[in-house]
Image (cartoon, rainbow, N blue to C red):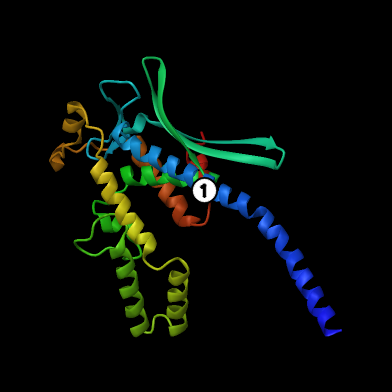
């Protein structure tokens, strides 16, 4: 009886392993194929640094510089004449409805639309991208800490990108908050658990490596006109916003202060309503 039970157990285990061995080869192939595809996309994205000149925004001149593909000279447009849009579309597939979102900005030049567009993961993200650009051009924030470091992950002398210094600053901030009784030891424990699960400092090392590779690859040289346009101006030569823009901005700020949780799109719609 004992031998029969052991034999049946072996048969059962063998039956359970058959699907695993059957799909093992396919799974390995799909992993290699997916990795190769991701590597190709990553490599093509890095090559764009040597082929494309990104759109530039100059707060002192209150202008935007476009470098259309194939053009030999940049195009400059006043900031307040720039148009921006957010698009939303959907398509039906055999797996269901797929939604697509994007954000773009541009202006009319000699009867043609000069624009730059890119995809976004969600409608709110597309709106947030434009709000980030608008905030940079309109708000008087002239230091890196005030613009991008609300969590105090940058210290004086740190490079502007995220990296190993970001992790070290976050860990030092955690220890300080624990010492000052701002958070408890349980918060610190789960902080370490989270970072252990996300491979500790490996993501930061990858960012550092990618930054160095981008610097090694280099970027496409800027035209002389764009280099001159990018030079800083003395404060007395800085362009001023129009009276109409100041009036609309004041109304936006008042509505945001009155209803801070209200969607920014609804606020803009109310401000521009005739």
Number of labels in the image equals: 1
Q: Is residue 53 above or below residue 172?
A: above
Q: Is residue 18 above or below residue 141?
A: below
Within the image, what quadrant is residue 82 found in? top left
Q: Which of 19 and 274 is in front in this view?
A: 19
Rendered location of residue 90, percent (x, y)? 63, 36
Q: Nearer the viewer, residue 38 or 263?
A: 38
Q: In which quarter of the image is the N terminus?
A: bottom right
Q: In this view, does 202 lie above or below 224?
A: below
Q: Which residue is at 54% across, 50% downward?
A: 31
Q: Which residue is at 69% across, 54% downward?
A: 22
Extreme residue in the front direction: 3
Rendered location of residue 134, percent (x, y)? 37, 42
Rendered location of residue 137, percent (x, y)? 31, 42
Q: Which residue is at 47% across, 51% downward?
A: 255
Q: Is residue 140 above or below residue 182?
A: above
Q: Name the residue under label 1.
A: 32
SS at mark 1? helix
Q: Which of 70 and 117 is in front in this view?
A: 70
Would you say residue 26 is visible in this rendering?
yes
Q: Classify residue 143 as left or right of residue 246.
A: left
Q: How crowded is mark 1: few (under 14 residues within 10 Å), some or many (20 or more)?
A: few
Extreme residue in the top direction: 111
Within the image, what quadrant is residue 101 found in? top right
Q: Which residue is at 47% across, 44% downward?
A: 36
Would you say residue 127 is visible in this rendering?
no
Rendered location of residue 155, percent (x, y)? 24, 65
Q: Classify residue 97 as left or right of residue 251.
A: right
């Amino acid at each position: 009886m004992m031998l029969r039970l052991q034999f049946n157990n072996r048969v059962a285990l063998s039956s359970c392993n058959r699907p695993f061995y059957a799909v093992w080869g396919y799974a390995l192939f799909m992993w290699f194929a997916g990795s190769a595809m991701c590597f190709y996309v990553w490599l093509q994205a890095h090559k764009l640094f040597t082929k494309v000149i990104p759109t530039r925004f100059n707060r002192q001149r209150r202008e935007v510089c476009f470098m259309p593909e194939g053009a030999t000279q940049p195009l400059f447009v006043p900031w307040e004449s720039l148009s921006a849009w957010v698009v939303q579309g959907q398509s039906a597939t055999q797996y269901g409805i797929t939604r697509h979102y994007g954000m773009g900005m541009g202006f009319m030049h000699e009867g043609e639309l000069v624009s730059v567009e890119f995809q976004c993961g969600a409608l709110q993200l597309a709106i947030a991208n434009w709000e980030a650009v608008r905030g940079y051009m309109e708000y008087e924030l002239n230091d890196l800490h005030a613009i991008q470091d609300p969590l105090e992950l940058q210290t004086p002398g740190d490079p502007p990108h995220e990296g190993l210094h970001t992790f070290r600053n976050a860990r030092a901030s955690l220890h300080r908050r624990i010492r000052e009784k701002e958070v408890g030891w349980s918060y610190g424990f789960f902080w370490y658990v989270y970072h252990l699960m996300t491979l500790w400092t490996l993501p930061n090392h990858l960012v550092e490596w990618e930054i160095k590779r981008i610097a090694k690859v280099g970027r496409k040289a800027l035209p002389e006109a764009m280099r001159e346009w990018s030079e800083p101006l003395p404060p007395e030569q800085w362009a001023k916003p129009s009276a109409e823009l100041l009036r609309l901005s004041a109304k936006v700020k008042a509505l945001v202060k009155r209803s801070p949780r209200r969607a920014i799109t609804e606020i803009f719609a109310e401000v521009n309503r005739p």
